[in-house]
Image (cartoon, rainbow, N blue to C red):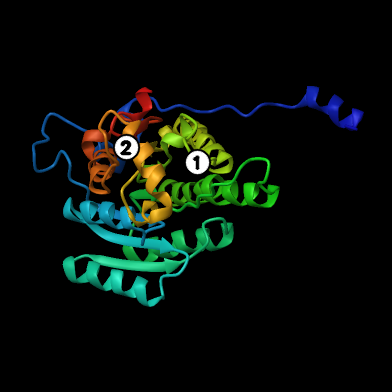
């Protein structure tokens, strides 16, 4: 039963109010410089200079996107993942450093749902690499279980990592951006699961976590625009990676392709351009948007 005194006190509360930006001139100078202008040409329009933090950074799709960012001018990179010390992780990092020897590429192990650890890493990234310009949140987990059999513990875990973890990382990154008065770009990786129920697999917890991520994106976009920070999300369709391989997924893969106007799954490279766009000058007026990259599956 609710406390009647506490309920009565609600009538005395004062609501906080958002402050919106007042045009380009009200933004930090660094954010103004990151805005598209008539002087832009092919060499600057999609240029992505500066420093990025990428969570879930050692995954197949994340590494593909990271390479694109480095190719477009990124100079400093911090990759976050659960374990960056394994043999596999070290091999991936080594390959990336060999490919981009002039760039500073760091990595750190972290659980994105650990607020204290994430805050520490964001601060140390700024100390090592300089002001933070971009955050791309790939970190996430999936679960395919019938709702009648799904434990609340697993349900909470998916929301804790996929939704709360994204908020924790965004908040920590935004605090550094505001402190440095530089503005920045934050990108969440959502999913078409945020828009429609998947078929044939049941995945209520994952779908819920990604649906919540869309409103998180919109809410932060509204609050943080005044600081020159844009917040957007990308909703990929089914990607043809090792996560969706195996004989046990053959029927599902066939179904996913058949229910898509493009008749196929996506490739990791097909997400890279959207991330580059949202980080570049060309994406300066895109804020609070969800960019669906799914070959047209969402039309059904």
Q: Which residue bears the numbered disc 2? A: 257
Q: Is residue 27 visible?
A: yes
Q: Quadrant of the N terminus?
A: top right
In this rendering, the answer to whether 107 lies above or below 144 is below
Q: Is residue 18 left or right of residue 48?
A: right
Using the rendered view, name the quadrant where residue 67 is placed: bottom left
Nearer to the camera, 184 or 146: 146
Q: Residue at x 35, y 46 (%)?
A: 182
In front: 278, or 296? 296
Residue 184: x and y in percent read: 35, 44
Q: Are marks 1 and 2 in contact (CB under 8 Å)?
A: no
Question: Where does label 1 land, which residue?
Answer: 201
User: How many tags in the picture?
Assistant: 2
> Which of 275 and 252 lies nearest the eye of the viewer?
252
Badge 2 density bin: few <14, some 14–19, many ≥20, Cα 10 Å: some
SS class, disc 2: helix
List x then y, in percent, for residue 90: 33, 74
Say which label, 1 or 2, has the lower sequence index: 1
Distance between mark 1 and mark 2 Cα atoms: 14 Å
In the foreground, 39 or 152: 152
Q: Residues within 10 Å of mark 1 (few under 14, many from 20)?
A: few
Q: Tell me where residue 228 appears, x and y as whole percent.
A: 37, 37
């Amino acid at each position: 039963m609710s406390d009647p005194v506490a309920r009565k006190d609600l009538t005395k509360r004062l609501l906080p109010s958002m402050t919106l930006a007042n045009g380009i001139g009200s933004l930090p100078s660094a954010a103004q410089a990151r805005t598209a202008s008539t002087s832009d040409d092919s060499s600057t329009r999609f240029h992505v200079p500066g420093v990025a933090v990428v969570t879930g950074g050692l995954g197949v799709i994340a590494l593909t996107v990271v390479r694109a960012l480095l190719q477009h001018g990124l100079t400093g990179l911090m990759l976050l993942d659960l374990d960056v010390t394994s043999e596999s992780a070290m091999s991936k990092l080594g390959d990336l450093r060999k490919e981009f020897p002039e760039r500073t590429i760091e990595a750190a192990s972290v659980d994105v749902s650990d607020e204290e650890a994430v805050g520490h890493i964001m601060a140390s990234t700024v100390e090592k690499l300089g002001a933070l310009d971009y955050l791309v949140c790939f970190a996430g987990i999936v679960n395919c279980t019938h709702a009648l059999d799904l434990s609340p513990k697993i349900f909470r875990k998916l929301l804790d990592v996929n939704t709360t973890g994204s908020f924790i990382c965004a908040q920590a990154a935004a605090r550094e951006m505001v402190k440095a008065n530089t503005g920045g770009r934050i990108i969440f990786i959502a999913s078409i699961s945020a828009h429609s129920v998947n078929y044939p697999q049941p995945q209520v917890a994952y779908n819920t976590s990604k649906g919540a991520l869309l409103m998180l994106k919109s809410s932060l976009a509204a609050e943080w625009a005044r600081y020159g920070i844009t917040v957007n999300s990308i909703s990929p369709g089914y990607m043809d990676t090792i996560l969706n391989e195996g004989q046990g997924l053959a029927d599902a893969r066939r179904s996913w392709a058949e229910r898509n106007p493009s008749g196929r799954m996506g490739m990791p490279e097909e997400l890279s351009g959207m991330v580059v766009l949202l980080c570049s000058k060309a994406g300066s007026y895109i804020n609070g948007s969800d960019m669906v990259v799914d070959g047209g599956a969402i039309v059904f």
